[in-house]
Amino acid sequence: MMHGRVKVKSTAQQEEEKRKEKEEKLKAFVTARDAVLKKRSAGEHDEEALQLTRQLLSSNPDFASLWNYRREVLLQLETSREKDEVQKLYESELHFIEACLKVNPKSYGCWHHRTWVNTRLSQPDWTRELGLCDRCLSLDERNFHCWDYRRVVVKESGVSVEQELQFTDRLIGSNFSNYSSWHYRSTLLPQLHPQPAPDSAPNTSPSPTTSPQAHSHRVCEEQLLKEYELAHNAFFTDPNDQSAWFYYRWLLGRAEREEMISCVYVSREGERVSVAFSKPVHAQSEGLMLVLDGQPQQVEWRSTHPRLRHSPVWLCDLPPGSISDISNEHNLTIHWTEKHTHRDCALYTGCAESWCRDSATDQELFRSELSVEKSSVLQAELQSCNQLLELEPQNKWCLLTIILLMRALDPLGHEKETLTHFQALKEVDPMRSSYYSDLCSKFLIENTILKMEYAEVRVFSLSNKNLTTLCHLDQLLFVTHINLSSNQLLRLPPQFAMLQCLEVLEADDNAIESLEGLYHLPKLEEVSLRNNQICKLSDLELLASCTKLTRLDLRGNPVHRTAHIESELSQLLPLVTALSL
């Protein structure tokens, strides 16, 4: 006090006192830490170790080594105590962990240690653990550590899928923005309401008491239609919240493809067999067996490019003379023993090549067959989203969802409108412009594959479409002529080597710098790469692996400025007889 007034400390004084206080706390922490680590090094597993680690973890629950030491101590104490004492020991540990969670509810160490402690209890109280999860999630609904722990508790306690789905109902009902609840719901629905297998009885359904880990199917249509309405209510309530939009996008997605052999191609020229799978595989370890005319063949499988260790397309060469005589007929079977499936292919007399495949349409790769009811509901959803877009013209989630709905309903019929919406998306969300360009490219390629199959041709043309990326190249195995001119491509990726039947490539007026995918294309005869960004002679070296290449157009590329370019190219590509620079 001075003259009846309280002396107020200056900011500098307060900061100095805080600094000293922190130093004292740090000094005490370091001293205790060193003592604990010394005891651990000495192999001491006693009550004192529990007390010291408790002191440190109470202030810093993220010290993983201390949790590890604590487990060692508990295991040691467990050996010298009666069953009831061990139960009390671990019950006390659970109370301690709960106190630590109040310090940091997102501590990896706490949640991991709690999981471990429950495995040591003879009769864990899973109801209590579920209640703990409820309390933690009520404080922070996006605590993914707690969500992970809840899944463990649900699995161990046998809580039904139906109960957990009702739990997500409550959380979503109280807050549409609860992304974690929407995601959890997406894992539960296929278990409680799976899409029936083609040969299953129409009225069969899993028991509502089934554990959430019991099934892994797509959602049946009846429930799917109800989920559309739930998501619809959410994003109409708050159009700018992304959680419901993401969930809606999952609802519109296609089922994961079944693992199978989707195509077998055989060519007398080179006596080569190409096999395409529904997913990238490592064929050398998948137990593939090739049988020709009833006789197993010793062949070596290789991917179409050295960089593709896992690839959807694999090749092998048959023994010389196996199928070269065009007057003979052959039957070939590929057995995929790991998946208990096979694929047959017949090579008829007078035919130089043959194939057996499922088309993209048959496999429903890019669009699914819609029932009348589902089509009607999606049409109504599209109309509602268009109405919302009139109210919220700058809403990117609404624009993207309209695109997805159009693709689910009729990708070819809505192509023009889809392109218009993609342009609007780039304007309202310029930071993700590249993502939208790539997604638009993907959809255009899918549409072109569908058109090509409907027309039953082997020519693929996508010129002047602003393509920024290439995808689904495994679906172009039979294409003989491809036109990618006047786009925005920067490279021909390794996957381009899957085009084993390609004869002519046009890719003028892009910005291509890398030709990595032009690798061992056995039928490639003509390549046009005018006005690209090929700068070095080394960029063209892989073309030497294309042994039928005779025509090459490189006009408008920086490489033409290389000294002695014509003589260098004639040495690199001696079979090229028509070179344009």
Image (spheres, rainbow, N blue to C red):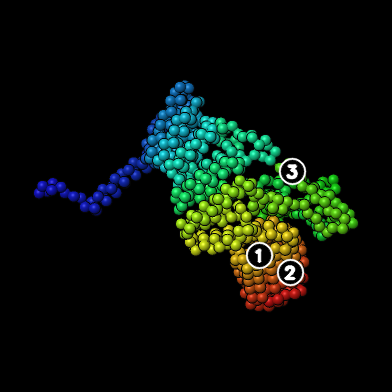
Q: Residue at x 48, y 46 (%)?
A: 233
Residue matched to label 1: 462
Report, in whole angstroms, how far the alpha carbon at label 2 lies from the one at label 1: 18 Å
Question: In what element is the residue under mark 3?
Answer: strand
- Quarter of the rendering occupied by the C terminus: bottom right
For the residues labelled 3 and 1, say whether their Cβ atoms are less than 8 Å apart. no
Report, in whole angstroms, how far the alpha carbon at label 2 lies from the one at label 3: 38 Å
* Residue 87 makes an appearance in the image: yes
Relative placement, left or right, of 287 versus 443 is: right
Quarter holding residue 550 = bottom right
Instruction: Name the disc covering residue 341, or none.
Output: 3
Q: Residue at x 56, y 44 (%)?
A: 225
Q: x%, y% of residue 285?
A: 70, 46
| Residue closest to the far right | 327
Q: Of marks 2 and 3, which one's residue comes earlier in the chain?
A: 3
For the residues labelled 2 and 1, say whether their Cβ atoms are less than 8 Å apart. no
Q: Residues within 10 Å of mark 1 (few under 14, many from 20)?
A: some
For badge 3, the amino acid type reads: Thr
Relative placement, left or right, of 439 versus 502 is: left
Q: x%, y% of residue 97?
A: 42, 35
Relative placement, left or right, of 60 versus 365 is: left
Q: Of marks 2 and 1, which one's residue comes earlier in the chain?
A: 1
Quarter holding residue 101 = top left
